[in-house]
C-alpha cells in the first residue's frame, strides 16, 4: 500500500526520478494494470490526459506504411501463449488480434518501417491497456512513442544500427564475468566467430524481451525497469542474463562442437529464466553494471583481442554528446532517458559580470608588475623544460614507453 501511494504521488507531480527508482523496487509498479499503464506513459513521454481524440481504426486504415501484409501474417501467429494461459476462445483471440493489427498499422507511417517483432511489443502494451477502444487509443500513443524514440533503430530500413549496438554485449559480459567472456568470445576461433555477432540477442533488443519471456508477471516487471532506464539498459539486462546462467553456458562450452549449441543456448536464456526473484537479481545486476560501466567505459576496458571488433561501437560512444546518442548513431547505445526530465535551471556563471553601476576595480601598479613577473617566470620555466625534453632523447623515449617514468624524471630534473 505504501508503494502504491508513493507511485501515485510521483505520477501526480510528474516526478520521473522517483518513478524510475520505484520501478526497481520488488514487484515494480505492482499488480494494478491501470497504474502501471500511467507509469509507462509518463516514462515514455505520453500524457493520457492531453491525448487528442483519435479513432484508431481510421488511423490504421489511412496509415501509409507499406508493410501491411507482413503485419497481418505476424498478428495471425500472435497471442497464442496469452490465449492459452487465460482460456481465450478462438473468437475472443481473433477479436483481439484485430485490435492488435489496428494498433500496429496505426503506429507506422511512410517515414518508418515495421519490423517483425514489433507486434510482440504492441501486444504487451495492449495487454496492460486493455483490448477496448480507450485501451487501443492509449496503447497506440505508447507504441508511437516507443517506435519514434526507444525502438527507432529497428524502425529504419535495415538493422545496421541495431547490429552495431549489439556489439556492446561482449564487453559488457566481460565486465561482469571475465572468465565467462573469455570462454564465449574467441575472435581467433572461426567456430566461435558467430557468437561475436550477437544475433542471438536480436529479439531481446528489438522487442524488449516481449518475444522471449512468456511469464506475464515477470515480463511486466521487467518492462517497468526497462522503460525506467536509458535505452541501452536492454543490453545491460542481456549481459546480466548471460552472467546469471554462467554455469549452464560453461558446461555447454566444454562439449565438442560447442559453438552452434552455445548460439542456441544463448538465444533461449530468457525463456529458461523464470520467477520474479531471478529477474529481480538480473535487473539489479544490470543497473549496478550501468552505474559503474557505461558504454564508453565498457569499450575502453574491453580485452585487446576485441578492440578491432569494437571499432564501430567505439566511434559512437567515445564522442561526447552530453549523454545523448551521437547524430545518426544507435539510440540503443544512448545513456539518456527517452523521456527526459524537465530542464534544470541554468546555473549562474561563477564569474559575475560587472554591472554598469559598479565601479571599476583598480589594481595597484606594483601588484600588476608582480603578476606579470610571475607569469613570465612560469613561461621561461616551461620553455626550459620543453627544450630539455627535446634535447634529452632518453627522457623523451622514457615518456613514450612509460609516462610514469617520464614524470618521475621530470620532477628529478626540477629538483636538481
Image: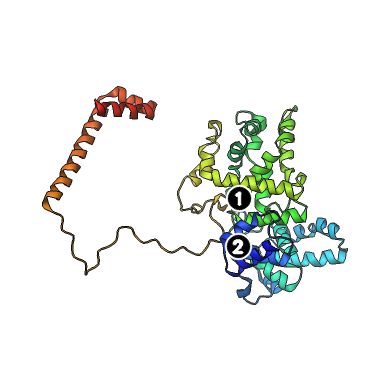
* Depth check, front residue: 414 or 162: 414
Mark 2 highlights which residue? 44
| Residue drawn at the location 83% of the way across and 59% of the way down | 83
Q: Decide: is 318 above or below 337.
A: above
Residue 115, visible in the rendered structure: no
Instruction: Report the Cα–Cα distance between label 1 and label 2.
Output: 14 Å
Tell me the quadrant of the picture where the C terminus can be found. Answer: top left
Direction bottom: furthest residue: 53
Task: Say which element carries label 2.
Answer: helix
| Residue drawn at the location 82% of the way across and 65% of the way down | 94
Q: Position of residue 282 (x, y in %)?
A: 67, 46
Q: Position of residue 171 (x, y in %)?
A: 58, 38
* Depth check, front residue: 139 or 375: 375
Tell me the quadrant of the picture where the N terminus can be found. Answer: bottom right
Quadrant position of residue 199: top right
Characterize the local packing of mark 1: few (<14), some (14-19) or many (20 or more) Cα atoms within 10 angstroms: many
Quadrant position of residue 136: bottom right
Mark 1 highlights which residue? 233
Left or right? Give the position of 205 relative to 309: right
Characterize the local packing of mark 2: few (<14), some (14-19) or many (20 or more) Cα atoms within 10 angstroms: many
Q: Position of residue 332 (x, y in %)?
A: 58, 51
Task: Say which element carries label 1.
Answer: helix
Label located before the other in sequence (1 or 2)? 2
Amino acid at each position: 500500500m505504501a508503494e502504491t501511494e508513493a507511485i501515485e504521488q510521483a505520477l501526480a507531480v510528474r516526478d520521473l526520478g522517483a518513478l524510475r527508482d520505484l520501478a526497481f523496487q520488488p514487484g515494480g509498479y505492482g499488480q494494478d494494470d491501470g497504474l502501471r499503464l500511467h507509469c509507462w506513459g509518463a516514462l515514455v513521454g505520453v500524457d493520457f490526459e492531453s491525448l487528442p481524440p483519435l479513432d484508431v481504426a481510421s488511423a490504421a486504415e489511412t496509415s501509409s506504411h507499406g508493410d501491411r501484409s507482413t503485419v497481418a501474417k505476424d498478428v495471425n501467429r500472435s497471442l497464442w501463449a496469452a490465449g492459452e494461459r487465460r482460456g481465450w476462445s478462438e473468437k475472443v483471440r481473433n477479436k483481439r488480434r484485430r485490435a492488435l493489427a489496428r494498433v500496429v498499422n496505426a503506429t507506422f507511417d511512410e517515414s518508418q518501417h515495421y519490423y517483425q517483432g514489433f507486434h510482440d511489443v504492441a501486444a504487451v502494451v495492449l495487454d496492460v491497456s486493455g483490448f477496448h477502444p480507450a485501451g487501443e487509443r492509449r496503447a497506440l500513443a505508447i507504441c508511437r512513442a516507443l517506435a519514434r524514440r526507444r525502438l527507432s533503430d529497428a524502425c529504419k530500413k535495415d538493422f545496421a544500427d541495431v547490429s552495431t549496438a549489439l556489439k556492446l554485449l561482449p564487453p559488457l559480459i566481460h565486465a561482469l564475468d571475465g572468465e565467462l567472456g573469455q570462454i564465449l568470445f574467441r575472435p581467433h576461433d572461426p567456430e566461435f566467430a558467430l557468437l561475436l555477432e550477437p544475433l542471438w540477442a536480436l529479439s531481446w533488443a528489438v522487442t524488449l524481451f516481449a518475444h522471449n519471456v512468456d511469464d506475464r508477471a515477470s515480463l511486466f516487471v521487467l518492462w517497468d525497469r526497462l522503460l525506467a532506464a536509458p535505452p541501452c539498459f536492454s543490453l545491460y539486462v542481456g549481459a546480466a542474463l548471460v552472467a546469471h546462467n554462467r554455469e549452464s553456458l560453461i558446461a555447454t562450452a566444454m562439449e565438442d562442437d560447442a559453438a552452434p549449441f552455445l548460439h542456441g543456448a544463448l538465444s533461449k536464456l530468457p525463456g529458461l529464466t523464470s520467477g520474479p526473484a531471478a529477474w529481480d537479481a538480473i535487473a539489479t545486476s544490470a543497473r549496478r553494471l550501468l552505474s559503474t560501466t557505461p558504454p564508453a567505459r565498457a569499450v575502453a576496458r574491453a580485452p585487446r583481442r576485441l578492440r578491432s571488433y569494437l571499432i564501430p561501437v567505439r566511434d559512437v560512444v567515445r564522442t561526447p554528446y552530453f549523454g545523448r546518442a551521437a547524430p545518426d548513431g544507435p539510440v540503443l547505445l544512448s545513456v539518456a532517458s527517452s523521456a527526459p526530465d524537465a530542464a534544470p535551471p541554468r546555473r549562474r556563471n561563477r564569474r559575475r559580470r560587472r554591472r554598469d553601476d559598479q565601479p571599476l576595480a583598480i589594481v595597484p601598479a606594483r601588484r600588476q608588475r608582480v603578476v606579470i613577473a610571475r607569469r613570465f617566470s612560469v613561461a621561461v620555466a616551461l620553455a626550459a623544460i620543453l627544450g630539455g625534453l627535446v634535447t634529452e632523447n632518453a627522457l623523451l623515449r622514457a615518456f613514450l614507453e612509460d609516462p610514469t617514468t617520464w614524470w618521475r624524471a621530470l620532477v628529478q630534473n626540477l629538483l636538481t
